Amino acid sequence: MTDSYARNLKLQLEWYGEPLGDRFRRLLGRLELSQAQLAGILGLSAPMLSQLMSGQRAKISNPTVLTRLLQLEATVNDPAWDSHSPAEQLRRLDEIRGAQRSTLTVDQVKETPATPVPAGDPVVAIQALLRDVASAGDIQGASELLEDRYPELAEALRVLGAGRTQDARAYYTKITGHG
């Protein structure tokens, strides 16, 4: 395994609690789907799903895809899932396929945590919140829009929302004086 793959898998562990490949393989086995079918439900291309599974890519950058993953995990892990008819199961999968970010419920988040946050680590909590709301590209774009009028806010958004954790920690320490 190359350094970039190992780094990506480590980041997945940090951001999602385990490598995405493990999460996706559980869903594939539970639902008896192909990777292309799972990708279709989540709103990813099959190659992107494969890259996330193998560690070629670290992050699900589209918040809607992450929402669908959480909904799918919560749905198939519900003990009632097996009692549904195949037609009802298909209907529920189609519902998830059409879901937008705003349909994620608090109960689903509690049942299937997206990004575990180490206790007492405000930087990781801030990053998790921002990354659950928007992709790194969207955060970067928002910071660029703010740059001229609110440069300090733009920097905070860029470093905390789209930057590396070690850079975010250094920035947090600089701003708050707490390490």
Image (cartoon, rainbow, N blue to C red):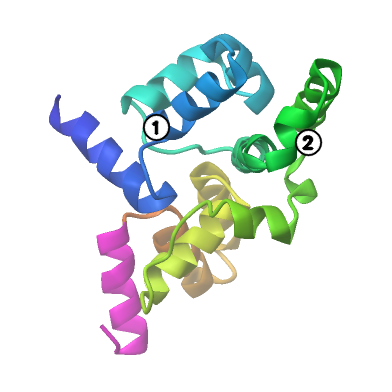
| Residue segment shown in magenta | 165-179
Observer-nearest of 137 and 3: 3
Where does residue 162 sit, x and y in percent of width and height? 43, 53
Specify the quadrant that holds the N terminus: top left
Most common secondary structure along the magenta stretch: helix
Residue 58 x/y as whole percent: 37, 36
**Residue 165 is drawn in which quadrant?**
bottom left
Provide the residue designation for mark 1.
22
Instruction: Find residue 103 and name its label.
Output: none
Residue at (57% x, 53% y) in the render:
132
Q: Is residue 105 left or right of residue 138?
A: right
**Image quadrant for the C terminus?**
bottom left
Q: Secondary structure at mark 1?
A: helix
Q: Is residue 158 above or below residue 4?
A: below
Q: Earlier in the sequence, mark 2 or mark 1?
A: 1
- Could you tell me residue 47's position as x and y percent? 47, 13
Residue 155 seen in the figure: no
Q: Is residue 103 magenta?
A: no
Mark 2 vs mark 1, foreground winner is 1
Mark 2: amino acid = Ala
The tally of labels here is: 2
Q: As shown in the figure, which amino acid type bears the numbered disc 1?
A: Asp
Q: Nearer the viewer, residue 121 or 151?
A: 121
Most distant residue in the bottom direction:
177
Q: Which SS class for mark 2?
A: loop
Q: Residue at x 28, y 63 (%)?
A: 167
Q: Residue furthest front?
A: 83
Q: Taking 77 as reference, is 96 left or right?
A: right
Q: Residue at x 30, y 88 (%)?
A: 178
Q: Residue under label 2, please give it.
A: 99
